[in-house]
Image (cartoon, rainbow, N blue to C red):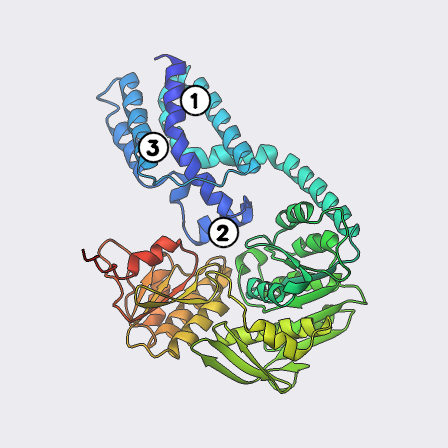
Amino acid sequence: MDAPILTGFTLLACLSPLLTFATFWQVKEWRWDRLREEVIRERKFLPLVGGHIRPLITLLFLALFPILPTGSLLLAALGVLTLLNIVQIVLRKQRLPVWTTKAKTLVGTALLLDVALAFVLSSSTPFALSVIFLPLFQSLSLGAAWAVFLPMDRHLKQKVMARAKARREAHPELMVIGITGSVGKTTTKELLAHIFNDRRPLFTPAHVNTEMGVAQWILKHLLPEPFPQGTPLIVEMGAYRTGEIVTLCSFVQPQIGMVTFIGNQHMALFGSQDALVKAKGELLQALPPTGHAFLNGDCGLCRDMQRFCSCPVTIVGTGGSDDLEAYDVEETPTGIRFTVSGTPFSVPLHGTHNVVNVLLTIAVAEHLGMTKPAIAERIRTFQPPHRTFEVRQEQGITILDDTHNSSAASFKAAIAWAKTQPFEHKTLLTSGLIELGEEHQRTHRELGALAAGVFRETIYLNRQSAPLFAEGFGKAVLPLTSQTPRVPDGSLLVCVGRMPPSTIQRLLPLPAPKTI
């Protein structure tokens, strides 16, 4: 068979599985360690081979190999795979990566590798049949492209971060606030930005908390013109291993550091609790002696992080012995209420676990010159981040949406909140938690046990961790299928873990038909 024709068909057959895997890996920020953990720990092998249909099609045509001529077999197999790709695209079922420069480069390079390999194989009669396997190994093509560009990628990152450092140093008038922790970073960042709204603060947007993301954001938003003295620059700092916050701090140069909570999120990547604490403590170690650290006193691991500080420390909490304390904590239909040093606070933010996040914000704002009454007045108009412990009403259903990001701590907080709500029918919709390492099994069983007696049923999206959760829950959990009933009108739906908004909509009651 003509090698160029066979190469063209092979390339078309490879396109969809390549895009699927690229999307999957991009969600993991093109990191090998996160990809490895997702595949091995969560057993998500299907994205590596483009789904479950393509391997079955390949096996079917291989079974027909003794019957059909090789040329006809290859064209038929590749034609069916190409048709499957077209159907996915037409039905809008094809997952696509966000077309950043990196995504374009890696996918384009992988396609070039596919073309070269397909042409070489199809030009050799003994190996021509092996091109049928190429669509199943697009993870290797993309992995090879990633490896080829890795040295250049690291070099470019260093250049970007060096430029970001120079840009930051050109603005000594800024008051840089770094926020880290296993959970609560985004909420605390948004609270600070809201309180300091009249000072026109700069703050990192959603999902921007890594070295490259923050560096690129600084280059885009720190213009050469000076800012008013003391303008807050609020930076959310995430990490998956030790050394990453050190790198962030090297060019962000924070003067204030906040640690919201230390849990077991991403434990699989850190390897141990000590390594996780050390990684978060890098922010505190980077603070100058003239800086200031603010810690969550309700979390023992956070409290112990005072040892990393060479600057003054303020500890906040609800335990009765910290520098800044909340009393008379109350959950209301509109949010949380509490008192700090005689000043009442009413915050339109649900979940009493958020009290400490608010306290951290109050402490920083007071440190930077605001009074408690002024803070209390400003915080009354706060709007919680979308999909971060967000409570809303839709189609007669009360929804707790905590699907922006999730940890064991926020999962437990969602269960505790649901327990206090006066609904007869409560449903939990969850995708479970990831990157927990050795804590994976214990954590999911514990969460199931906590949810037992609170929720009438649990709809579980992750088949791997569902049995573990069910052990603690004491009864079977339900998968989400076309037969899964919608939740009844007037009930509570608690949604925890990463999932698209369409998944939540799938469970809501159908809108009433319009009358003419």
Look at the numbered discs 2 and 1 and tell me whether their residues touch, using CB distance below 8 Å.
no
The residue nearer to you, when weighing 296 against 372, is 372
Q: Nearer the viewer, mark 3 or mark 2?
A: 3
Where residue 220 appears, as percent x and y from the top left, is: 66, 45
SS for dot 2: helix
Q: Earlier in the sequence, mark 3 or mark 2?
A: 2
The residue nearer to you, when weighing 164 against 193, is 193
Task: Measure the alpha-carbon separation of dots 2 and 1.
Answer: 31 Å
Which residue lies at the image location 39% right of the left edge and 59% below the top edge? 431
Which residue lies at the image location 35% right of the left edge and 26% below the top edge? 132
Where residue 65 sits, quadrant-wise, is top left
- Please tell me whether residue 487 is drawn above or below residue 18 in the rendered image: below
Q: Which residue is mark 1?
A: 118
Mark 3 burial class by Cα count in 10 Å: few <14, some 14-19, many 20+ = some
Which residue lies at the image location 58% right of the left edge and 63% below the top edge? 190
The numbered mark at residue 37 is 2
The numbered mark at residue 85 is 3
Residue 218 visible in rendering? yes
Task: Specify the amino acid type for callout 2.
Answer: Glu
SS for dot 1: helix
Where residue 497 appears, as percent x and y from the top left, is: 43, 60
- Please tell me whether residue 21 is drawn above or below residue 122 in the rendered image: below
The residue nearer to you, when weighing 194 against 151, is 194
Task: Specify the amino acid type for callout 1.
Answer: Ala
Where residue 285 sits, quadrant-wise, is bottom right
Mark 2 burial class by Cα count in 10 Å: few <14, some 14-19, many 20+ = some
Task: Measure the alpha-carbon separation of dots 3 and 2.
Answer: 28 Å
Q: Earlier in the sequence, mark 2 or mark 1?
A: 2
